[in-house]
Amino acid sequence: MKLILLGAPGAGKGTVAKLLTELDGSVQISTGDILRGAVAAGTKLGKQIESLMKSGDLVPDDLIMDIMAQRLQEPDCEQGFLLDGFPRTIPQAEALKSLLEKLGIELDMAVNLNLEREVILDRLTTRRTCSNADCQAIYNVKSNPPKQEGICDKCGCPVIQRDDETAEAISHRLETYNEKTAPLIGFYENEGLLLNVDAAGSSEAVLTAIGEKLGAR
Ligand code: AMP
């Protein structure tokens, strides 16, 4: 399947994407994970974007499009892909549309995960992430803590609170989402690709809604 996952930070895009990869071998592509990997590795790109990311600002569209134009042409994308955190602005969505047309790739749909601001704030302040750039497993101190406090179940590295998950950075990320990313809902509605899903329920309920829509196409 070839899906875009839309929704505010904390709406559950990464969790849903991971579950979907298990269904048919589609690959999860998270621009946030790619960028955090670059910062952790101290690459030229990483140094350029570190402070933007820390404060919860978006990375410039042209940098993101360079990354994604390459990534979408890698062989593992042939089986399908789940775009998690991309596109994030109207110019990115327009550039993605041209890129996919050029590559002869058709999207199945854009899934918008709807969640109330209060729930999002609670989820983000209690979220913890594995510090290993190659793992980046997600935990939650309330609902899904690691078996051993502060240690990743998968790779044994320390589990941390991300720099951009302080109260101040979170509120900035949500403002950025409302201003720059929420307009994508209308964009994909116009394209006839939008599926709105209530993300307050279980991940399984979200998967079922996606499966039904895919089946109905
Ligand atoms: P995420 O893990 O998706 O919440 O992304 C974390 C941070 O990475 C964001 O707050 C942005 O600074 C940056 N980022 C991720 N994806 C994008 C994107 N598509 N466009 C611009 N910046 C992005």
Image (cartoon, helix red, strand yellow):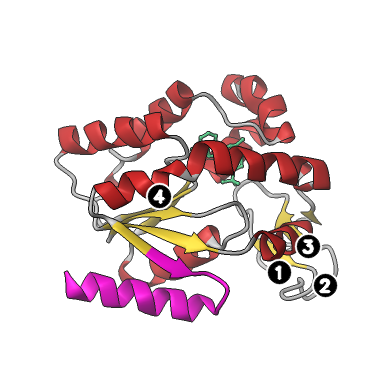
Q: CA distance from mark 3 to mark 4?
A: 27 Å
Q: What is the span of residues highlighted in magenta in the rendered image?
A: 196-217
**In the image, residue 212 above or below residue 58:** below
Write the residue at 36% across / 47% down. Answer: 186
Q: How far across and down, in percent of the image, does residue 94 sit? A: 31, 32
Specify the amino acid type for callout 1: Asp
The residue where tag 1 is placed is: 153
Circle 4 packing at 10 Å, graded few (<14), some (14-19), many (20+), is: many
The residue where tag 2 is placed is: 148
For the residues labelled 1 and 2, say whether their Cβ atoms are less than 8 Å apart: yes
- Closer to the chain start, of discs 1 and 2, is 2
The residue where tag 4 is placed is: 185
Secondary structure of the magenta portion, mostly? helix
Assess mark 4: CB under 8 A from ligand 1?
no
Residue 142 is inside the magenta segment: no
The residue where tag 3 is placed is: 126
